[in-house]
Image (cartoon, rainbow, N blue to C red):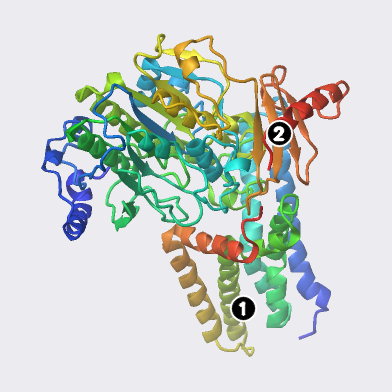
Amino acid sequence: MRKRSDAGTAGAITRRGLLKSTGTVVGAGIAGLSGFGFMTSLLGAGDPPAHPAVQLKPRRGGRGRDGRPNLIFILGDNHNASVMGCAGHPFIKTPGLDRLASEGVLFDRAFNTTSLCSPSRASILTGMYACRHGVKNNHTHWTGEHSTFLQHLSDAGYYTAFIGKWHMPGRLPELPFLDLYVTYTYREGQGSYFNCPMLVNGREVPSRNYITGEVTDYALEFMEAVKSSDDRGPFCIYLSHRPAHPPFQSPAPFSGMYDREDVMGLLPPNVDPHWYGKTNRNVFQGIMMGSYYDQYRRYCETLTAMDRDIARLLEYLDRNRLADNTVVIYMGDNGMSWGAHDHHGIREPYEDVIRLPFIVRAPGIIGDPGSRRGQMVLNIDIAPTLLDLAGIGTRDAMDGVSILPVLRNPRGTTRDAFLLEFFRYYPEPTPTYRGIRTGSHKYIEFERGRDPWLFDLAADPGELHNIFGHAGSAPVVEGLRGRMAGLPSG
Amino acid sequence: MKEIPFLRRTLVPVAIVAACALLSNLVYFGLRGVDASLINQTVRIAAATAAGALYFLSTAFGPFFVYRATQRRGASVGESILAAVAVPFAWMTKEVLLLVSSHPFIECLYWYLNPFNIWFVLLIAAECGAAALIVRRGRVRAGEPAGSARVPALVIAFSVALIVFLYAWGKGENVYVIFLEGYRFLFGTGV
């Protein structure tokens, strides 16, 4: 990682110029931020962060500190649920996520409902299936027709911040209720790991930092501003990271840290480690990959780089005595396939693609920290859960449900089936599909080009045998179709 | 010099490259279908590596061989260019057809314009230029009419410069973004 002394300075000068022009006051208190010890020790530099102070808006309702929990939702990108130390991965180092899991709960059956970046992100923000919120693929625009959980929380008196990857097509929405709005539109909203131009409250600000460090700095600054406010919160942060979206890049000391790790025994035997020149089923991406084993190592390195900043954020909460009243949630927008079924990436409705890493730390709510939950939870559950945690109730328009009862009670229940949907996304060679995933089966109907899929997940967890059309499968299909009919469509 | 018939002067070099590409493709992808218990993983990787290398070399650098071979057999420049692009065009068409199972045909045709293909076309142009220079040198040594070296040299310089520029500009991602914007302009969101 570049030293802050040379990485952050150039950006700081520009920001200060910007702040002067807009009349914003640079908070002298920033220099006193106490949460940077981790980063400082890592970098060997003692410079304070050089970001502009956040200007908090008057809280709606104007209530004083009311005991409601602070909420931090951290989103990863294309993060395969098994690639975490706490999930049993053989070599990746994720002490931040491991700590989160040891102090909270790790969900083994968390899923997304649409395996594509923009639809999944819209589902997280709205609590709705893609067919209902309308962001069907990475080309369809976010219309702003549906409110996000951040809007609801702001209406309920929370300070709110959106920080990081927005990545939905169309112009960036104006979200005037936010107290801090940091994002980027660079490269179709994908951003870049280094030197990603940031938009801070609508104004472009150059970057000289690794992206996970930069967005985390903004989150710390936001919390610092809330801490300095008269009523001290509560607040909600949506912190959306770029890792681990390709092309995988990480700073020192992470870059190359897994060069000697054995990947051969970890990935499916059909993977070709040297060429991966195939474009079959992966079109563009397959050509560009080069060594597949090295790609996997780089993927792990970007996740470790992100994890280091998650750990830094947790440390900030500790130092500022916020940990006991702050719920921290980590989730990925999609899983990621690494060669299983001859497939790389997302989109296809296989388990390693739809399954998400999902960890919740909720002090005072979770009575059995360090445990695992097997209930079926979804990306569309995030919005209603956060609203429930804030004590403002869920919205009827949401398809998801609050998992607060499951956090409180290990034997709580959620659902036993959900809708899996995908809308064709050019140029990826996956047709539009709609299906259902229950506790025991997965059934998918494709719009064109493929016969339906039926997997008995209990007998065939690797999804190696499509039993659609096999003897005895007709009643199962009929039952699943009947259940699908009761799920949203559009 | 006795004129070689069209089939022999153009199709034979193309057929050699096409056969290499096809066979290596079959081996490369065929290895994926072999049950893991039936083949040692190290052997599988070694075979896939060899087949993958041949597949890549024959598809990506076959045009150099084809252009040079057809020129030496007396083909015209137009014939040599058409012969040189035959296998790459077949490969691009295979990629287009892969999309047919999920997208309307007219949208699949747009895939011919994807950035990788643009790079590929530039590479082919550079290869043909290099082959033309080599053929010319042979003709000069043999005392035969050789033509100017200026055109192939310019083609090489222009192609390589554009390849480097398009990659240097955002590591190629910016070109891909333009390609997607073109798609949305022509076809909307697709859903």
User: How far across and how far down the image is residue B107, in percent?
Assistant: 69, 61
Query: In front: A175, or A279?
Result: A175
Residue A370 position by quadrant = top left
Name the residue nearer the viewer: A427 or B112. A427
Query: Horizontal and vertical percent for residue B118?
Result: 58, 66
Badge 2 amino acid: Gly
Instruction: Compute the Cα span from label 1 to label 2.
Output: 59 Å
Image quarter of the N terminus of chain B: bottom right
Q: In the image, which is nearer the foreground, mark 1 or mark 2? A: 2
> Both on one chain, marks 1 and 2?
no
Along the line of sight, the residue nearer the viewer: B33 or A345: A345
Residue at the disc numbered 1: B135
Q: Position of residue B128 (x, y in %)?
A: 61, 74
* Residue drawn 55% across the image and 31% down it: A396
Return the residue nearer the eye: A366 or A49: A366
Label 2: chain? A
Q: Chain of mark 1?
A: B
Snapshot quadrant of residue B146: bottom right
